[in-house]
Amino acid sequence: MTFQTPANLVAPTTNGTAAPAKNTFVLKAGLAQNLKGGVIMDVINAEQARIAEEAGACAVMALERVPADIRKDGGVARMSDPKMIKEIQAAVSIPVMAKVRIGHFVEAQILESIEVDYIDESEVLTPADDTHHIDKQKFGVPFVCGCKNLGEALRRINEGAAMIRTKGEAGTGDVVNAVRHARTLMSEIRKVQAMADEELYAYAKDIQAPYALVCEVKKLGRLPVVNFAAGGVATPADAALMMQLGMDGVFVGSGIFKSGDPAKRARAIVQAVTNYNNPKVLAEVSEDLGEAMVGINCFELKEEQQFEKRGW
Amino acid sequence: MSQTTSKATIGVVALQGAFSEHIFMLQRLPQLVASTVEIRSAQDFEKYKDSIDGIVLPGGESTTMSIILERETGLAQGLKQWIQDGKPIWGTCAGLIMLSDVITSTKQGGQTKLGGLRTTVRRNAFGRQSDSFEIDLEIPAIEAYGPNPATGSLKLPGVFIRAPVIEAVHDEGVQVIAKLQGREGREGEIVAVKQGNVLGSSFHPELTGDVRFHQLFVDICLQNKKN
């Protein structure tokens, strides 16, 4: 049996006191640990959220337009209408996440005030700050952030992110970038594990990551928080591929509700993530799913159309 | 041989959620636990059911798990039979919800369950993630294992994430082993119970550094194995 050291196995900070502690990192990262092995689905209204919940989604991401439409429409993409998010919160019993623009801490304050369960500081929306990300340590609500490699993941964790995801090209249906990011991340983690302690200082400098977090990665043999795949996942096979590459779970954006039979595809992707190592089950659930979303080949995207370039 | 027979083999249901954390915690008890196995399907269950001494139903999203179990009918049947046979099983958070005979605050249309634990459990009883909290719990059942080495306290760190509570136990066969204390206006809720070999907790010992609650469950498994 393979065994991965889970993240954040540390004693909580309450230390014998009677009063409850809220918004601690254990709670933030712990919610993500409970989402592992699950599928988080993009939804744009309460009806879609119900379909996702019935299909077995472990959480939903509430947003006004799925990435495929953001890509098509162009212009500036912003935080969703709080009213729409509240309707989705009322419709389902699973956690509800929502996106804010990179660096837009006021959008985050707004989402925190309506009690979303997780905030995605997302490159899919138009960045509001071209230098700084949100100081996520200051918030009680947990954050998930995207990364292309280990350095970017650790910078986000240092800012307070309690969950990480790959930064595949959302809204394309092309999984190639998510695969590249997952492979890069896993390979850099293996590299850190093989390094001598004194090499970690120089490596931390190279990848522009805090030294303490690089040491933590060496100790754990994985990121210190849960790490999902995201961007371009369109089929059960894509989802299982990301799981076999070592991701803890999968975000599916446009892939479900831009396809022919969303309910069926959503169920199939949930089953694929549970049974990612079982090709027989994967074959069964891949049958007769109807049309997949129309894909855009990532290699045909112009540089300014690549979401992964957003974030610093 | 006697070495391995005096230790337990534990199956962890690995459909979704914090299952690797449970496996990690169980592996920190090498003097009691011989090995752990992941159970994802009816085939896994058939393969391991005669060699395991207890089953852990981890935390995660209970709606997700119940929907997966609706499809995995063989596994659901196997687990129900396991519970009916009175064999050791422990549900944390979502796992507790799955075990409870009555569940309130479910998704629209309700959710399927395994049942067997004679309790009424309310999902998301404290609210959304912003209402999640950590608090130290007084649990006499684990005090025999000594204090938590990290804090020196006999209390168990309780991690409650969008947690359920046990609103009611249906008869005296269900023993209350932990209640909430120290939360203003919200005191005395039941957060852990034991009914024969069935253990249920609304908090997450697997997200702490304290292995004593796992030790309590493994002891139940070993005791059952002996008898």
Image (cartoon, coloured by chain):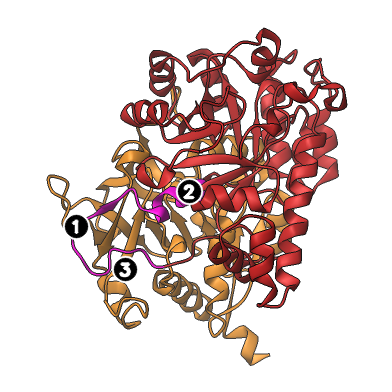
Indicate which label's residue lies in the foreground, 3 or 2: 2
| Three-letter amino acid code of the residue under disc 1 | Ala
**What crowding class fits label 2: few (fewer than 14 Cα within 10 Å), some (14-19), or many (20 or more)?**
some
Left or right of residue B40: residue A281: right
- Rendering colour (chain A): red
Above or below, A222 relative to A280: below
Q: Nearer the viewer, residue A201 or A274?
A: A201
- Secondary element at image label 3: strand
| Three-letter amino acid code of the residue under disc 3 | Leu
Range of magenta residues = A11-33
Q: Work out whether mark 2 precedes mark 1 in sequence or the reverse, and give the earlier one.
A: 1
The residue at the point 69 percent across, 48 percent down is: A247
Indicate which label's residue lies in the foreground, 2 or 1: 2
Identify the residue under disc 1.
A19
The residue at the point 54 percent across, 66 percent down is: A212
Mark 1 chain: A
Q: Residue furthest bottom?
A: B2
Mark 3 chain: B
**Chain for colour orange:** B
Mark 2 chain: A
Residue A159's mark?
Answer: 2
Q: CA distance from mark 3 to mark 1?
A: 14 Å
Identify the residue under disc 3.
B156
